[in-house]
Image (cartoon, helix red, strand yellow):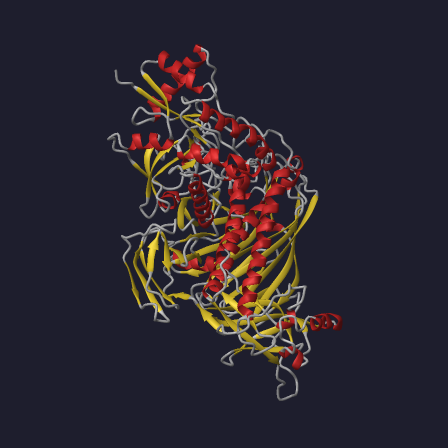
């Protein structure tokens, strides 16, 4: 008789490395649980398989204390009894960068290969929402099947099995995982088994297209259920219309996909809270730590990897293993609970330590590589230094530098003699004792009389602003200095205008004029395009009755804004290079929800706002400092754009995404049994925009990646700065009824953020229709500041670490590795390939509507160029591209004829 119900069973554990407990606790308990899994698989032939949560980090944790079990693991993996991979950690997808997700998969798969095999499934049982780009990322590792738990809704698709398609057309066969513990809560008693089977049959009838429901026997930190084979036999005897059996997710999904059913295709991100909680405001929990994550991600891919690639092409070592360590630390923090920061304070301290470790590693690695490069350039000037540009096109802009100079006022020029505008901010002569210490180290690297000793130079420690012109694409330019010449009156021309004039309330450059109103809001005018915006930068404090998982509107809220506040101008500086205005804005806020409900504002909170306008820049840079003294509230910045909208535009991994500003499901979500309120609180990677055919406004940030579009006409961008909540989990919230998420009423004092914090973002306004490539590149530029280094020989002392100088200095004064010929695409990163002597240049087309072409010049000889998948090995043969030049040419042109919408491509150049 043909069985009506097909129930493949996946024995597994979902192993959170940290949460309300620390990594140390999960590591220690894994010594018991994992060893027991290995024992059962080896001793009981009826126990066919076990899935070890698809993440390799937990195996490394185990082997740290039981290295002798490596052979056991390899044997069980090779026998396909122990199922591992493909992830390094169970990553979040909504606020983690595309590069972070790629490295998570890459290092997870490579580590799994060492043990013999890996599961080719994008298994994501607990991520808080699913990015629309996951099918493309998975396909980039030749993974074409996926299963996830959170984010699906009936509106999206009412069945479990479907094809999920990314904007570029990549797709995976996907099976919705309702619960990764849907086959756990029963005993071996007949009544208990009958009860759960009837529930499973009902769910199969409702949700499955093909009469198959995957059963997951396991849950958070659960040990192996040793009697599972006996239970399966008993179930098959009790229910003749069912087939219960051990299986793997690989085998189950292939069976479903190939059964002849014509499955539908679903597109887009999955962030619905209908069936499972997706926590659509966790993006701003522990803003202090989220900011460290975001700044680290940007620093690694926008600065460190490009810098180290340039150093590699100039003959220095590319430290692949250092980057592996960096990305694995970031991967540990990218796990869904870890990056959610919905943890105990002790756990979050460990997370912060990892971020600080990453920052320190990257800082020191970058310094070493810039020092190696600088030391390899011929010494034309004792005080010469390099400015680096890691954008794929030439750039001019402002750099604030701390360098040593031979005079208290200097002029900066390049190798062709062009003088670059500069302003000395502060200059202090080096103390004689420090100079004598420098002299004491002379001769250790065989140079007994360096140039700085011969010339007996004075040394000043100088803070300087430089308008650096035409810094080469993906490269550097060397600068020199001399004493600023006197003018005809015998005085040195001073470019700075020290105008701390508190009576002024505006700053401007050639493009923008910005005025601070009495209440601290801004009027911003683009003079070039004759467009003016009012009502920017209103601060909002609303009550927050939520926890570390979710913002929740209080039952009795009082929203306070800075609209009626008074400002005090602290400093105004209108300068040809960099203008700024600094002001204080004070708000009276309630201490907590109880005070807010009583309409009492008993805490004065001061926000220090500084606005910056750089020469020739169309971007207003904003910095906000605050010491938070209140709890149970959320603080946002509001930008009234005047653009009535039905959708917002924000960036996601490798492209943009459009989202509705209103969800009709919000009208009756409780009656329809949703797990949480449908909300338009949304994530982003670096920018959010509102636009129409006439004008557009964008906010760019590397701080909290959360926004919402509000207002009667949905014309106001609300950018979250931070949330302050006292507990990990709370039950019966207005926006999330029922049980608590996490641990109920677990105190988290650190999540109250009663501390000093700093936030920064940029504001861009423009006439004309919205152009995704223009905004995406503007965001990339905002996130990729100039870097600089001065490898002066007198710095070769223990303070900076002693280092031998190359015997011959033969590197060029100026250098460019490559440049983009158009700006249709955005550079994701450039890095050395993991296993080959090749360079990986990853680009993407940010547009979600139009395909585009791509052209670049590669300034090194090569004839070996290919487009590869994210695994860096699989060549994509159906990409049309041409290369003009060969290894004898100093310049080669590379053209890709078509880059699909929101498509990322990896160009491998040998």
Q: Of 54 and 749, which appears nearest the observer?
A: 54
Which quadrant does the C terminus fall into?
bottom left
The answer to whether one can see residue 508 in this image is: no
Quick check: 416 above or below 269?
Answer: below
Q: Of 655 and 670, which appears nearest the observer?
A: 655
Farthest-out residue, bottom: 488
Tag count: 0
Q: Give coordinates of residue 722: x percent, y percent.
A: 58, 45
Quick check: 412 above or below 592?
Answer: below
Q: Give coordinates of residue 659: x percent, y percent.
A: 41, 44
Farthest-out residue, right: 433
Q: Of 413 and 44, which appears nearest the observer?
A: 44
Left or right placement of residue 427 versus residue 261 in this view? right
Which quadrant does the N terminus fall into?
top left
Q: Give coordinates of residue 3: x percent, y percent.
A: 29, 18
Name the residue rendered at 64%, 43% in the picture. Answer: 753
Name the residue rendered at 41%, 30% in the picture. Answer: 81
Q: Of 473 and 766, which appears nearest the observer?
A: 473
Q: Give coordinates of residue 233: x percent, y percent.
A: 38, 15
The answer to whether one can see residue 889 in this image is: yes
């Amino acid at each position: 008789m043909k069985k009506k119900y097909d129930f493949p069973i996946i024995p597994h554990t979902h192993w959170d490395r940290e949460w309300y407990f620390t990594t140390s606790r999960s590591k220690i308990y894994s010594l018991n649980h994992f060893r027991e899994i290995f024992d059962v698989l080896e001793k009981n032939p009826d126990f066919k398989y076990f899935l070890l949560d698809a993440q390799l980090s937990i195996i490394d944790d185990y082997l740290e204390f039981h290295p002798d079990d490596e052979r056991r693991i390899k044997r069980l993996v090779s026998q396909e009894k122990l199922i591992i991979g493909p992830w390094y950690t169970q990553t979040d997808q909504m606020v983690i960068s595309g590069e972070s997700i790629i490295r998570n998969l890459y290092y997870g798969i490579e580590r799994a290969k060492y043990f013999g095999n890996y599961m080719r499934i994008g298994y994501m049982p607990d991520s808080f929402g699913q990015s629309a780009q996951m099918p493309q990322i998975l396909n980039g590792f030749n993974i074409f099947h996926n299963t996830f738990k959170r984010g699906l809704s009936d509106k999206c698709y009412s069945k479990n099995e479907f094809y999920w398609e990314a904007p570029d057309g990549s797709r995976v066969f996907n099976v919705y995982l309702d619960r990764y513990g849907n086959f756990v809560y029963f005993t071996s008693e007949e009544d208990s088994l009958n009860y759960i089977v009837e529930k499973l049959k009902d769910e199969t009838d409702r949700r499955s297209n093909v009469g198959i429901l995957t059963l997951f026997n396991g849950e958070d930190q659960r040990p192996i259920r040793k009697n599972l084979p006996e239970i399966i036999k008993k179930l098959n005897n009790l229910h003749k219309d069912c087939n219960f059996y051990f299986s793997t997710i690989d085998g189950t999904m292939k069976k479903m996909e190939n059964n002849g059913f014509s499955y539908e295709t679903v597109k887009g991100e999955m962030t619905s809270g209908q069936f499972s909680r997706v926590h659509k405001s966790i993006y701003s929990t522990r803003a202090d730590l989220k900011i460290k994550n975001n700044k680290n991600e940007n620093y690694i891919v926008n600065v460190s990897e490009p810098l180290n690639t340039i150093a590699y092409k100039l003959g220095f070592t590319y430290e692949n293993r250092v980057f592996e360590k960096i990305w694995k630390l970031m991967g540990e923090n990218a796990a869904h609970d870890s990056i959610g920061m919905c943890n105990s304070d002790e756990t979050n301290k460990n997370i912060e330590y990892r971020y600080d470790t990453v920052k320190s590693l990257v800082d020191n690695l970058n310094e070493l590589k810039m020092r190696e490069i600088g030391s390899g350039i011929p010494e034309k000037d004792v005080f010469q230094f390099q400015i680096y540009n890691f954008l794929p096109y030439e750039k001019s802009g402002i750099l604030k530098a701390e360098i040593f100079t031979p005079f208290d006022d200097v002029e900066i020029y390049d190798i062709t003699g062009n003088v670059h505008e500069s302003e000395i901010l502060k200059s202090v002569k080096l103390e004689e004792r420090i100079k004598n210490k420098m002299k004491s180290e002379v001769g250790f690297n065989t140079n007994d009389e360096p140039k700085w000793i011969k010339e007996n130079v004075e040394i000043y420690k100088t803070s300087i602003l430089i308008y650096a012109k035409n810094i080469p694409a993906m490269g550097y330019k060397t600068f020199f200095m001399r004493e600023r010449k006197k003018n005809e009156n015998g005085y040195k021309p001073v470019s700075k205008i020290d105008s701390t004039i508190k009576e002024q309330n505006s700053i401007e450059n050639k493009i923008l004029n910005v005025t601070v109103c009495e209440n601290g809001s801004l009027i911003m005018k683009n003079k070039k395009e004759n467009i003016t915006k009012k009502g920017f930068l209103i601060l909002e404090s609303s009550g927050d009755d939520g926890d570390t998982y979710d913002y929740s509107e209080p039952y009795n809220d009082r929203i306070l804004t800075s609209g009626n506040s008074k400002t005090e101008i602290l400093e105004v500086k209108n300068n040809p290079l960099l203008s700024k205005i600094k002001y204080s804005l004070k708000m009276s806020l309630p201490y907590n929800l109880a005070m807010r409900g009583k309409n009492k504002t008993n805490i004065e909170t001061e926000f220090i706002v500084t606005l910056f306008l750089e020469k020739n820049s169309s971007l207003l840079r904003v910095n906000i400092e605050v010491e938070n003294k209140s709890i149970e509230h959320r603080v946002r910045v509001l930008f009234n754009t005047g653009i009535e909208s039905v959708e917002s535009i924000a960036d996601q991994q490798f492209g943009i995404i459009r989202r509705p500003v209103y969800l009709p499901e919000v009208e009756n979500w409780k009656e329809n049994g949703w797990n949480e309120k449908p909300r338009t609180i949304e994530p982003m990677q670096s920018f959010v925009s509102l636009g129409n055919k006439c004008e557009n406004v964008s906010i760019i940030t590397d701080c909290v990646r959360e926004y919402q579009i509000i207002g009667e006409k949905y014309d106001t961008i609300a950018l979250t700065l931070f949330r302050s909540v006292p507990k990990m989990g709370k039950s019966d919230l207005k926006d999330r009824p029922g049980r608590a998420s996490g641990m109920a009423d677990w105190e988290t004092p650190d999540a109250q953020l009663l501390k000093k914090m700093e936030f920064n973002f940029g504001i861009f306004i423009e006439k004309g229709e919205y152009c995704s490539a223009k905004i995406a590149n503007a965001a990339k530029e905002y996130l990729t500041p100039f870097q600089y280094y001065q490898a002066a020989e007198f710095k070769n002392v223990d303070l900076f670490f002693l280092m031998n100088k190359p015997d011959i200095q033969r590197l060029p004064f100026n250098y460019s590795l490559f440049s983009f010929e158009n700006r249709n695409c955005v550079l994701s990163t450039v890095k050395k390939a993991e296993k080959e002597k090749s360079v990986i240049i990853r680009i993407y087309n940010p547009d979600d509507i139009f395909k585009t072409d791509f052209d670049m010049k590669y300034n090194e000889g090569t004839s070996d160029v290919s487009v590869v998948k994210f695994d860096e090995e699989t060549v994509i043969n159906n990409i049309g591209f041409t290369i003009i030049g060969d290894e004898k040419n100093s310049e080669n042109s590379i053209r890709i004829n078509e880059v699909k919408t929101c498509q990322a491509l990896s160009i491998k150049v040998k």
